[in-house]
Amino acid sequence: RQCRDQPDCRTGLLVSRRRALVSGPARLALAMTLDIEGALHAWGNSRTDLVGTGKPLAKGLMRHRPRSPGRACYATVSVEDDVDGLDAEGVTSGAIVEFTVWSATDRESSRAAGSALATALLSLSRTRPVAAGVQLLMAAPVGWPEFVEDDSGEFRHTVRATIYAASA
């Protein structure tokens, strides 16, 4: 892994970069990069109503599935695609994001954690938090948790959202 201009170089985390277009006063398009995935991790893990002992996502948002997750719920974040044609004032980047909420114990725990995450995403347009140098402006539309069946022995629900952001 190269560690040139990545902000998380010291932590050793591989940062996903997304390209976007920014409209300036002269309406010139400038290439720009925002770390929406990193911002979502920082935002989600700072939410005391979501993360911590006894909370819906007790283990928080992670970049990769842990080898031994234990009994608490956690979520992974995956940026699937960039959003094109951003014309809204102040929006410089957009991405389609999928959150996968995992539970080793039961289906209801992963559904409840997914619902709590979806509800928190809906609040982005009111709070507009800044995390990892990115201002998260809004999440729309937010899909409610959808159960995914597999043979891994863990229960999981996915929440999909389009996230709009700007540089902070």
Image (tube, rainbow, N blue to C red):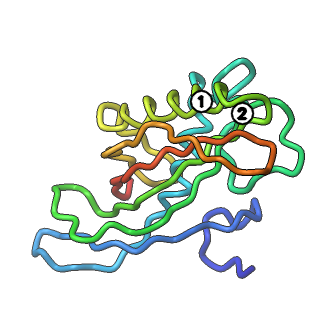
Give the mark nearer the N terminus: 2 vs 1.
Answer: 2
The residue under the point 40% across, 49% down is 161
Query: At label 2, which amino acid type do we have?
Result: Cys
Query: In screen coordinates, is 15 left or right of 124?
Result: right
The dot on residue 113 is: 1
The residue under the point 57% across, 68% down is 16
Packing grade of label 2 (10 A; few <14, some 14-19, many >=20) is: many
SS at mark 1 in the image: helix
Q: Position of residue 31 (x, y in %)?
A: 33, 79
Q: Disc 2 marks which residue?
A: 73
Q: Quadrant of residue 72?
A: top right
Q: Position of residue 156 (x, y in %)?
A: 65, 42
Marks 2 and 1 close (CB-CB < 8 Å): yes
Q: How many marks?
A: 2
Query: At label 1, which amino acid type do we have?
Result: Ala
Query: In screen coordinates, is 91 left or right of 88?
Result: right
The dot on residue 49 is: none
Query: In screen coordinates, is 164 left or right of 61?
Result: left
